[in-house]
């Protein structure tokens, strides 16, 4: 089993004004997505997904990580990160999940950015031009709400019914006028250290 890659799509967004107010530092959002043939397409219910996960996920992890690191100018610049997969209508949510919920995929990105946090994620099933939504969080601090962001874009011809779109997202910066506090403030106000 080898990766059948149809195309790679790159996305960038620079937020200069938010809420009618100029951002002190522009927020930069980046995403890179691979459109691949679903490795389980046309096979009916497959009990053991592991062979295809082991063959495809590491290749995707390396490819997408390399692209997004190049786009952002280096892993040290990335502050927020996340991942997503959208499986076409002939596939299962488990197919989308299998390709991104393995350390063989995510550890490429984690290592490249020096992260401590887990990768925020979505896995959905849809058709061409579906919204690809990649939730982000701070790579080192899960409670830092300024970096709770979502990158949303679409690919007009993907995923086809027998395809999967697999994507990574990154931010340089957080929301420009963050003012809702962090998780730790809530915990202190509620008199708790857990939550």
Image: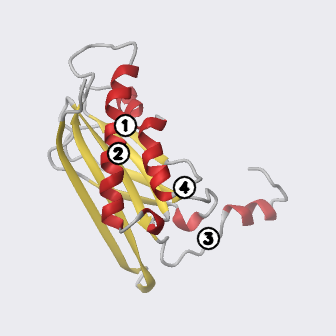
| Observer able to see residue 17 | yes
Label whose residue precedes the other's in the sequence (3 or 4): 4
Residue positioned 36% across, 35% down in the render: 57
- Name the residue tied to disc 3: 180
Tags 1 and 2 touching, CB below 8 Å: yes
Q: Does dot 3 land on a helix, a strand or a loop? A: loop
Dividing the picture into quadrants, the one containing residue 185 is bottom right
- Name the residue tied to disc 1: 58
**CA separation in Å, label 2 and label 3:** 35 Å
Label whose residue precedes the other's in the sequence (2 or 3): 2
Q: Does dot 4 land on a helix, a strand or a loop? A: loop
Dividing the picture into quadrants, the one containing residue 11 is bottom left
Residue positioned 41% across, 48% down in the render: 83
Instruction: Answer few, some or many: residues within 10 Å of disc 1's Cα (few below 14, many 20 plus, some between 14 and 19).
Output: some
Residue positioned 23% across, 28% down in the render: 2
Q: Does dot 1 land on a helix, a strand or a loop? A: helix
**CA separation in Å, label 1 and label 2:** 6 Å
Instruction: Answer few, some or many: residues within 10 Å of disc 4's Cα (few below 14, many 20 plus, some between 14 and 19).
Output: many
- Name the residue tied to disc 4: 115
Q: Position of residue 61 (x, y in %)?
A: 36, 43
């Amino acid at each position: 089993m080898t990766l059948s890659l149809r195309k790679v799509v790159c996305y960038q967004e620079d937020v200069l004004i938010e809420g009618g107010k100029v951002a002190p530092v522009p927020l930069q959002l980046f995403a890179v997505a691979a459109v691949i043939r679903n490795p389980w397409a046309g096979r009916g219910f497959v009990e053991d997904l592991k062979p295809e996960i082991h063959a495809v996920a590491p290749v995707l992890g390396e490819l997408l990580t390399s692209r997004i690191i190049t786009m952002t100018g280096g892993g040290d610049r990335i502050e927020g990160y996340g991942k997503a997969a959208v499986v076409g209508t002939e596939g299962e949510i488990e197919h989308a999940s299998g390709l991104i919920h393995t350390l063989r995929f995510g550890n490429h990105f984690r290592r490249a950015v020096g992260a401590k946090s887990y990768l925020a994620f979505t896995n959905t099933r849809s058709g061409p031009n579906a919204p690809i939504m990649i939730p982000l969080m701070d790579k080192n601090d899960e409670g830092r709400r300024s970096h709770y962001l979502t990158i949303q874009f679409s690919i007009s011809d993907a995923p086809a019914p027998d395809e999967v779109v697999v994507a990574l997202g990154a931010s340089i910066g957080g929301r420009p006028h963050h003012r809702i506090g962090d998780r730790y403030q809530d915990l202190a106000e509620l008199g708790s250290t857990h939550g």
